[in-house]
Image (cartoon, rainbow, N blue to C red):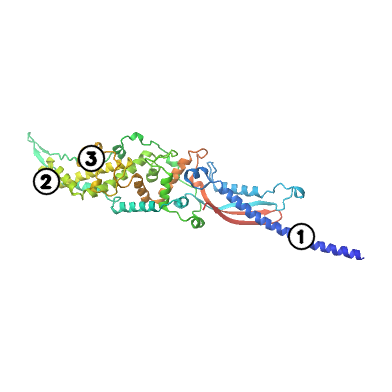
Amino acid sequence: MRRGYITVFLSLSLTLILSLVFTVIEGARISAIRMKFECVTDIGMNSVLAEYHRELLKQYDLLFVDSSYCSAHPAIANTEGHLRDYMHRNLQAGEEKGIFAGRDFLAMDVALAKIMEYSVASDDGGAVLRRQATDYMNDYPLGAILDKVTENAALLQGFGLDTTDVGAMRSKYEAEINEIGLPQVETEDGEIEEVPLSNPADAVNALRGSGVLNLVLEDTSDVSAVKVNLGSYLSHRPSRLRGTGLSAEAVEAGGEANDLVFQTYLFEKCGYFGEELDKALMKYQIEYILMGEDTDWQNLEKVARRLLLWREAANVLYILTDSAKVAEAQALAATLTAVMLMPALMEPVKYLILFAWAFVESLQDVKTLLGGGRVPIWKTAADWKTSISSIINARGSLTQDKSGRGLNYKEYLQIMLFLQDAETRTERAMDIMEMDIRQTPGNAAFRMDACFDSFLAQTSVSSRFGYSYEMTRRYGFY
């Protein structure tokens, strides 16, 4: 009887002990499921970011994941599939040995892997791209460079070189001549005819409609003849992929995009006339960002024409204050027969000669800049290169001159970029990136708007033991 009593007591004790053991085991299972879920989610999201685009990093030092994965069909659903696959693989039981062989004590599988938010390069007018470029350039000592660009742009705008309408100023004096009229004389045959003005400025004015590159370059055959079809690039695509924009976490971690820093970044990664890059499809990439034409020639021509307008405005404003040059123009005007017969023509003719002289000096400036020389924004008498006789043979009087002070071609380009709309600048920069990446193997359909640098994912797992958990996390290149 006593022996039976002990057996019952032991049975009751074992029941309690086993209940405790199984409770502990079940608690350990729950904790293990939660921990493994967290680890697997971290591994999966990190693995997605590990698929960053290698060529984009190599050429532009940017970390983005291409949601097309080198195909022609970009979609965030592709990335969701990759995330689910990474999580699924890491949830599978390993090869157990011994008494646990063939047993999975967690029995977990992916129930959901959905990307709720993601920031593509072109979001917010390219702010996502600019933030990354800004972050990359933070290790460079840019203070002096940025101050100089800002100072030069302020100086140019302060003189009004981007707003002065030289053409309207010149037209005023041409209208005065037309209003006064030319003198008339009687010929030996008794006929009345006008005395020709024979203004030497007319030869210069005839050049104004010519292409600037044809006037200032010694050999135009050296200019790149590359032409591209812009319709397939980001700034010209009728529709583009859009994410959810720059995340607050990215701004907090990496700071906001800095337009001036981004401009400096572009000069590090892009070529321009005189500093072309072998990898580039379009050789004058900065000029494309500025002008957006489909040929290198047109982009360089438009930049040269803008330089000419700036330089002509500066040279006209200066020459009108130089008493010695004004006196030379007046003396030349006085030698013209029509002026001698009608002194009222003296003033407008003098000013047209000054405008022509300033135009030739401006052609000389552009030739100097494209040849690697320097030209100051505002000149002194010592900086003036041409003589009044140069208006007789404008093209023949231009020389290749690398002496002098002032800004070089790159620094004038920096001013142009500074004055350009930030969104246009960024979109055209992404065109350039697409052009260059598409030349590399396997990237024929590459698109910047398919590339993201951060994402918010909602994931959940379930276990056949009846448990399920979910979490939401954001990962990115910050």
Circle 3 sits on which residue?
Answer: 204
- Place of residue 425 in the rendered image (x, y in percent of width and height, measured from the top left): 41, 48
Residue type beneath disc 2: Pro
Q: CA distance from mark 1 to mark 2?
A: 119 Å
Q: Is residue 155 above or below residue 270?
A: below
Which is more N-terminal, label 2 or label 1? 1
Q: Are marks 3 and 1 in contact (CB under 8 Å)?
A: no
Q: Residues within 10 Å of mark 2 (few under 14, many from 20)?
A: few
Q: Give the label on residue 261, or none.
A: none
Q: Camera-side residue: 450 or 326?
A: 326
Q: Is residue 207 visible?
A: yes
Q: Is residue 349 visible?
A: no
- Place of residue 338 in the rendered image (x, y in percent of width and height, measured from the top left): 12, 41
Q: Are marks 2 and 3 in contact (CB under 8 Å)?
A: no
The mark lying in front, picked from 1 and 2, is 1
Q: CA distance from mark 2 to mark 3?
A: 23 Å
Residue type beneath disc 1: Val
Residue type beneath disc 3: Val
Circle 1 sits on which residue?
Answer: 21
- Place of residue 390 in the rendered image (x, y in percent of width and height, measured from the top left): 22, 39
Horizontally, is 101 left or right of 236 in the view?
right
Q: Camera-side residue: 121 or 416?
A: 416
The mark lying in front, picked from 3 and 1, is 1
Q: CA distance from mark 3 to mark 1?
A: 102 Å
Circle 2 sits on which residue?
Answer: 343
Q: Secondary structure at mark 3?
A: helix
Q: Residues within 10 Å of mark 1 (few under 14, many from 20)?
A: few
